[in-house]
């Protein structure tokens, strides 16, 4: 290892929130922790709820609010829209007949207009 590159490795005292203290080696002289092997549920075999930030309380409040909403809201029942049958009033044959009649009427009107015009005499 290069000299003066790495931090000093010193004796360190670890202090737990439960009051337990023990010695180890580290680059700093003191470490404060919330859990150790004397108070952690894995090592003690006891089920202890560790809630430092109040996350469990917030979660339980959210669950209670959602259950209240479920109880107060009614289930919406989907009502099927009535089926509307499309009624075809006219068949395509009827429409074609109407168009043909209308075209004949237009042609007759056009012929009548041209017949009424007086003939222009050329001099």
Image (spheres, rainbow, N blue to C red):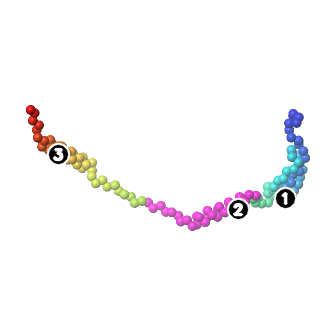
Question: How far apart in space, not on screen, are marks 3 and 1 (Cα)?
Answer: 109 Å
Pair 3/1: label in front: 3
Query: Is 59 within the magenta?
Result: yes
Circle 1 sits in a helix, a strand or a loop, which is it? loop
Circle 2 sits in a helix, a strand or a loop, which is it? helix
Q: Quadrant of residue 15?
A: bottom right
- Residue extent of the magenta highlight: 52-80
Query: Is 69 within the magenta?
Result: yes
Which residue: 86% across, 58% down? 19
Task: Identify the main secondary structure in magenta.
Answer: helix
Q: Specify which label sits upstream in the sequence, 3 or 2.
A: 2
Crowding near the residue tagged with mark 1, few <14, some 14–19, many ≥20 C-alpha atoms within 10 Å? few
Question: How far apart in space, not on screen, are marks 3 and 2 (Cα)?
Answer: 89 Å
Which residue: 31% across, 55% down? 87
Which residue: 40% across, 60% down? 82
User: Circle 2 sits on which residue?
Assistant: 57
Q: Specify which label sits upstream in the sequence, 3 or 1.
A: 1
Viewer-side residue, 20 vs 28: 28
User: Could you tell me which quadrant the N terminus lies in?
Assistant: top right
Viewer-side residue, 65 vs 107: 107
User: Could you tell me which quadrant the C terminus lies in?
Assistant: top left
- In the rendered image, the vertical position of residue 85 relative to residue 121, given as above or below: below
């Amino acid at each position: 290892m290069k000299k003066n590159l790495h931090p000093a490795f010193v004796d360190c005292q670890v202090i737990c929130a439960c009051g337990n203290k023990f010695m180890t080696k580290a680059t700093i002289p003191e470490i404060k922790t919330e859990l150790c092997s004397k108070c952690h549920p894995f090592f003690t075999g006891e089920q202890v709820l560790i809630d430092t930030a109040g996350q469990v309380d917030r979660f339980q409040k959210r669950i209670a609010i959602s259950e209240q909403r479920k109880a107060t809201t009614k289930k919406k029942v989907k009502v099927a829209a009535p089926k509307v049958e499309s009624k075809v009033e006219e068949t395509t044959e009827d429409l074609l007949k109407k168009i043909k009649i209308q075209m004949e009427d237009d042609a007759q009107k056009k012929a009548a207009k041209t017949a009424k015009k007086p003939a222009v005499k050329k001099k």
